[in-house]
Image (tube, helix red, strand yellow):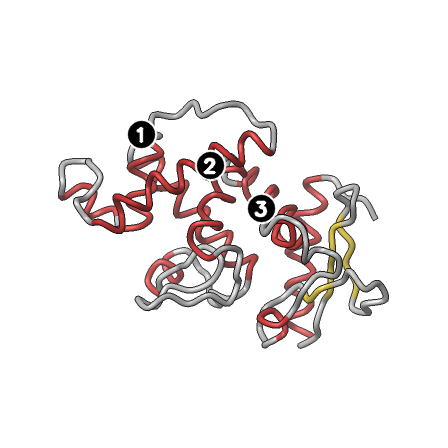
Amino acid sequence: MKLSPLAFTFTVLLTYSLAQSANATIYWFTDENGVAHFSNVPTDKRYVPFTSTNDAVAKKTIPGTRDRRPDTPAKVQYGAIIEEIARIYALESALIHAVVSAESAYNATAVSKKGAAGLMQLMPDTARRYGATDRFDPVQNLHAGTRYLSDLLRMFNGNVSLALAAYNAGENNVVKYGNQIPPFQETRMYVPKVLDLYRKYQVSMKLPPVRRGI
């Protein structure tokens, strides 16, 4: 079934809620035309688990993508969700893709040494602040991480570099150092890396060039 943006968002949220309440696994895939398909019976080999509350997410692969670009399976799995969440929070999907790529390489079960988890590597406090009860669930993680990024962009007047620095090092550190990128090696490497990915995704997705201050 082909879904409009609004219908897709509703279907995603409804599917997630029903799966949780029924303790069932919902499967989905996006076909070559960008159409999202949902089912509780995976009759097509392209179906993958929609939720990540068990080990299936860590083990799943998508047939036919082993020899393609590394980000191709991720775009199939999460591209449609990222696009909708980007609309909800009025951000460019390219920026969200860039952060996800840099943070977890699209691994929904990734955990850092510092305890950040999921696609956008949420710390426990950040997850609680934005209502994500399961950091390993892609939908919850993307919603919370994108909302946090949106708030940081507003906090730093649309300056992408400062917002990214705050995402990595915390907003208090950016403020502490006079609204400049903090002098932390990790952060100094993180910001240009994400900006480079951001521009590359804009080109590959044929989006307008960056308009925010960087």
Q: Residue beneath label 3, please?
A: 82
The label nearer to you, 1 versus 3, is 3
Whether tag 2 and tag 3 are in contact, CB under 8 A, the answer is no
The label nearer to you, 2 versus 3, is 2
Q: Find numbered disc 3 in the image and state the secondary structure of the residue it sits on.
A: helix
| Crowding at mark 1 (Cα within 10 Å: few <14, some 14-19, many 20+) | few
Q: Residue furthest right?
A: 43
Q: Callout 2, which amino acid?
A: Tyr
Left or right, residue 61 beside residue 126: right
Left or right, residue 182 beside residue 212: left
Q: Residue beneath label 2, please?
A: 198
Comparing 25 with 184, the one in front is: 184
Whole-percent x, y for residue 68 in the image: 67, 50
Whole-percent x, y for residue 47 in the image: 76, 62
Q: Residue beneath label 1, please?
A: 157
Q: Callout 3, which amino acid?
A: Ile
- The answer for how far apart the CA atoms under marks 2 and 3 are is 14 Å
